[in-house]
Image (spheres, rainbow, N blue to C red):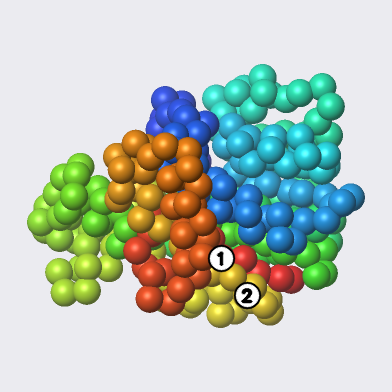
Amino acid sequence: MKTNQYLIDFYNNYDEDRRLALRHGSVEFLTTMHYIEKYIKPGDRVFEAGAGTGRYSHALARQGYTVDALELVEHNIEIFRKNIQADEKITITQGNALDLSAFPDNTYNITLLLGPLYHLYSIEDKRRALREAIRVTKQGGVIFAAYVISDGCLLDEGFKRGNICVAEYIKKGLLDSVTFAAKSEPRDLFELVRKEDIDDLMSVFPVTRLHYVAADGCALFLREAVDAMDSSTFELYLKYHLATCERQDLLGITSHAIDIFRK
């Protein structure tokens, strides 16, 4: 199984904890936790594939849940281990979300796949990761799969901030000149998709979708305004976001989405 060195190099120098801790970044974290808390029950076991530095794994372990985590990047694992508190029932293993053979079938009530699908570039690899996540989940358990959404990123990083040149991306074939659908390769780091891609990806699995959520909505596009909010205004903004993040007419305007389904 070939390792994406671009990915290793990126996460060796990236502060994922800080991204989710910034006010605009916390919208994604708080939204994901909001939906996890809808389904998790006392005594549940949690598995997280691609746990990063453990933002979600530690949050759930500190609520008393038993958590087994898997992470590819050694740098992230080092930070993960440093953040373990004495009362956490948590393990961390180095490995790839494409191969969960170290973990038995039908074991976990909640399975989190909140990062690996950002970095898989073929439908075969994506389905392999999803199949493995489903396999280790108990019948009736719930899986959370996260994606990077192309339109939110294009609006924010392209048209608003100019961090990517839209015309150049079209010239290189990374954006379709008519539909603006994105195409990514390993050196681009992030696989950008739309909901129709996710629907197609999931069409082969005998699962039931519970929610499809615009995890951060407009928070990244509005990051300066969100970061400048006082606590009460941010609380109101978050309430608005949670009230609208499943609206069909707003689902594409997000940088991250979560597909939540039951085995």
Viewer-proximal residue among 16 and 211: 211
Residue under the image location 30 percent in, 50 percent down: 221
Three-letter residue code for mark 1 = Asp
Q: Position of residue 234 (x, y in %)?
A: 45, 45
Q: Position of residue 20 (x, y in %)?
A: 49, 38
On the image, the x and y values in percent for residue 222 come to 30, 48
Left or right of residue 89, residue 126 in this image: left
Q: Amino acid at mark 2?
A: Arg
* Helix, strand or loop for disc 1: strand
Label 1 belongs to which residue?
A: 259
In the rendered image of this protein, does residue 63 appear above or below residue 82? below
- Whether the residues at callouts 1 and 2 have beta carbons within 8 Å, the answer is yes
What residue sits 62% from the left and 75% below the top? Answer: 209
Helix, strand or loop status at disc 2: strand
Image position of 87 (left or right of 217): right
The location of residue 226, given as percent across then percent down, is: 36, 43
Q: Is residue 121 left or right of residue 176?
A: right
